[in-house]
Amino acid sequence: MNTADAKRILETALICSAQPLPVRDMRTLFDDALGADTIKELLMQMQHEWAQRGLELVQVATGWRFQSRPEMREHLDRLHPEKPPRYTRATLETLAIIAYRQPVTRGDMEDIRGVTINSMILKQLEDRNWVEVIGHRETVGRPALYATTKQFLDDLGLASLDQLPMIEAPQQAQAMADVLAGAQQGLLIDEQPAPEVVAADADAPPAETVAAAGPDEPATQAAADEGTAGPLPDAGADDLPSSSLDSDAPPQAASSPNASGQTP
């Protein structure tokens, strides 16, 4: 098989695939007649050949795919004028902390943000398949350790965490969130002001007792004269808008007519 035929087969498979293709799957196209190094060399040549077109061939965490170039987004959005999902600053800061400091526990995140993190934020990020529990820290209570997933990298168009933009203030959650949002057009921050309170100290009740309170708000004493404790009504500090994380479509680093970032 000559090089031109091999490239034609690879192009067809990549354009028709709904998901990124790893090199091992592409070897199957040729019944393992081509080695991994040969296929990678062909992919590099194809990247150069497509350099002046509206599509680009990129490598992400789970393989290779064709996607529209960022400068095409303005035009493609006219076909699909839906507004991209927006994320509360608390949600994006939590995601940024996990991305830049992983693996981290919920306590680590709260120490960096300086406020209590609502359990729903972590659950929504897990449901989005952007973060996952990869283990537990061997300390009192064995808290869960969170890290980002390959799906997170794919949705942001990154091949590895090394491609995350550098930050000057790694200890500041706001700086991490701003850099992450600035690097990817699909991550928009909802700038509506939201009250936040200082995270409870070590003597405060565990996180499970405050999960029912509003985002970033610890549970407080319901009535001092009755000596009972209970959560405050949900203040909605980090309530997600209808187009937020509840949306089924993940943000895309580069616009494309389908959710996978590929364009037939």
Image: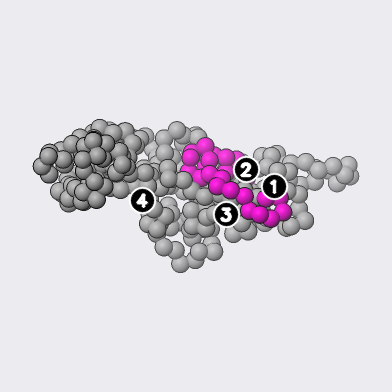
Instruction: Name above or below for residue 98 compared with residue 22.
Output: below
The quarter in which the N terminus is drawn is top left
Q: Earlier in the sequence, mark 1 or mark 2?
A: 2
Nearer the observer: mark 3 or 2; the answer is: 3
Nearer the observer: mark 3 or 1; the answer is: 3
Q: Earlier in the sequence, mark 1 or mark 4?
A: 4
Residue bearing the label numbered 2 = 119
Q: For this rendering, which residue is in front, 153 or 71?
A: 153
Q: How far apart are marks 3 and 4 (CA)?
A: 21 Å
- Residue 202 screen position, x and y as percent: 74, 57
Residue 139 is inside the magenta segment: yes
Residue bearing the label numbered 4 = 159
Asked if marks 4 and 2 touch (Cβ < 8 Å), the reply is no
Residue 75 visible, this orientation: no
Q: Magenta part of the protein: which range?
A: 118-142
Q: Earlier in the sequence, mark 4 or mark 2?
A: 2
- The amino acid at mark 1 is Ala
- The amino acid at mark 2 is Ser
Q: Which mark is residue 207?
A: 1
